[in-house]
């Protein structure tokens, strides 16, 4: 297998070394798409043999597509990995043993989230199957504010078993809260754009990503707004046995499943109130405020 790994990074000095070292013996080329980090990210990555490409941050989807367009990938396969992720021993072995002559154009990797030091194994959160490996030239990134996925020209995919992609961010809880506050804003804007018919084009997703988006729009999105977050938390924590993830698991399922979803709805409600005061639609008001 000849693989090029693409890593988005900004001030990731506490993560980047573990990420890159996990790719040793797997990726013949590691390319870091950096947003002009002000810490030692670039220095560390370069010392480990990674190539550095820098671009001002235009948003996650646009930045990754910029990387795809800018890096001249000559390997047969492309791997997407975040700076706070790394391959465990099982996944490294599975990638090394993967038959390059298979009829697949892409592979779903199993992602394992670690929160407050604890692997999350319940709440329908493990294993999360995400498309991260594809034949070079076959994939492109959806251009969305949130929940973007790689879309293949010909979605002939399989799940790569045998190991996990570990998502373990080492920043503190305050950082996590700030990050998800930003995510909630982006998701609120995306919802309002979708309701206005803006950026509503859906690319041809497949597999778990397609099912997840269908559930989000056709099930979760049809519930009363004040009940959505509570229902989702019940689904994860009780039906999905999230309580078996212990104390750290409670905080994760509550904050990521209830608090975050409530925050999104509250931000949309706030926008609706301001738009109503101005006698405008939500979309028109956001445009008038320069937020879209």
Image (tube, helix red, strand yellow):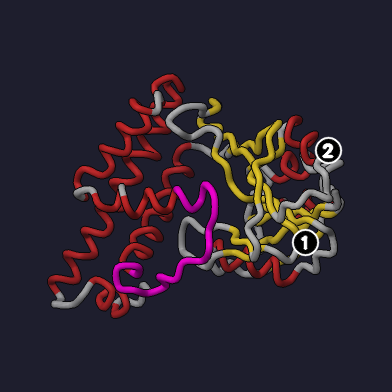
State whether residue 116 is above or below residue 196. Answer: above
Look at mark 2 in the image and give the residue it sits on: 97
Question: Is residue 208 part of the magenta span, yes or no?
Answer: yes
Crowding at dot 1, Cα within 10 Å, few <14 / some 14-19 / many 20+, comes out as some
**Residue 11 point in image, percent of width and height:** 63, 52
Quarter assignment of residue 161: top right
Task: From the viewer's perspective, tell me whether residue 41 is left or right of residue 230.
Answer: right
> What residue would you read off at disc 1?
52
| SS state under label 2 | helix
The image quadrant that residue 93 belongs to is top right
* Residue range corresponding to the magenta coloring: 193-211
Q: Position of residue 249 (x, y in %)?
A: 44, 26
Task: Name the quarter where the C terminus is drawn.
Answer: bottom left
Image vertical order of residue 70 relative to residue 3, above or below: below
Q: Image check: 130 left or right of 41?
A: left
Q: Are marks 1 and 2 in contact (CB under 8 Å)?
A: no
Real-space Cα separation, disc 1 to disc 2, in angstroms? 28 Å
How many labels were placed on the picture? 2
Which residue: 54% across, 54% down? 206
Q: Is residue 43 left or right of residue 186?
A: right
Residue 101 appears in the rendering: yes
Q: Indicate the secondary structure of the residue bearing disc 1.
A: strand
């Amino acid at each position: 297998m000849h693989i090029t790994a693409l890593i988005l990074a900004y001030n990731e000095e506490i993560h980047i070394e573990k990420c890159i070292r996990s790719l040793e013996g797997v990726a013949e080329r590691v390319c870091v798409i950096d947003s002009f980090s002000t810490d030692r990210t670039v220095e560390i990555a370069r010392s480990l043999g990674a190539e550095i490409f820098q671009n001002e941050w235009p948003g996650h989807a646009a930045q990754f597509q910029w990387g795809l367009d800018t890096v001249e990938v000559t390997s047969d396969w492309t791997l997407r990995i975040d700076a706070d992720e790394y391959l465990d021993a099982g996944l490294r072995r599975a990638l090394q043993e993967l038959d390059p002559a298979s009829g697949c154009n892409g592979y779903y990797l199993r992602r394992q989230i670690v929160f407050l030091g604890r692997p999350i194994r319940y709440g329908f959160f493990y294993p999360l199957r995400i498309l991260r490996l594809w034949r070079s030239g076959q994939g492109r990134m959806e251009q969305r504010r949130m929940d973007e996925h790689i879309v293949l020209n010909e979605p002939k995919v399989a799940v790569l078993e045998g190991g996990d992609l570990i998502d373990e961010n080492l920043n503190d809880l305050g950082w996590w809260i700030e990050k998800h506050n930003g995510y909630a804003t982006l998701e609120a804007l995306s919802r309002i754009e979708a309701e206005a018919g803006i950026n509503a084009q859906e690319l041809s997703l497949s597999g778990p990503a397609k099912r997840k988006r269908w559930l989000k729009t056709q099930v979760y999105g049809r519930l009363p707004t004040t009940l959505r977050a509570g229902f989702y938390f019940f689904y994860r924590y009780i039906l999905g046995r999230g309580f078996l993830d212990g104390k750290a698991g409670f905080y994760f399922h509550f904050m990521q499943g209830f608090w975050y979803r409530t925050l999104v709805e509250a931000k949309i409600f706030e926008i609706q109130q301001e738009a109503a005061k101005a006698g405008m639609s939500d979309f028109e008001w956001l445009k008038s405020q320069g937020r879209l």
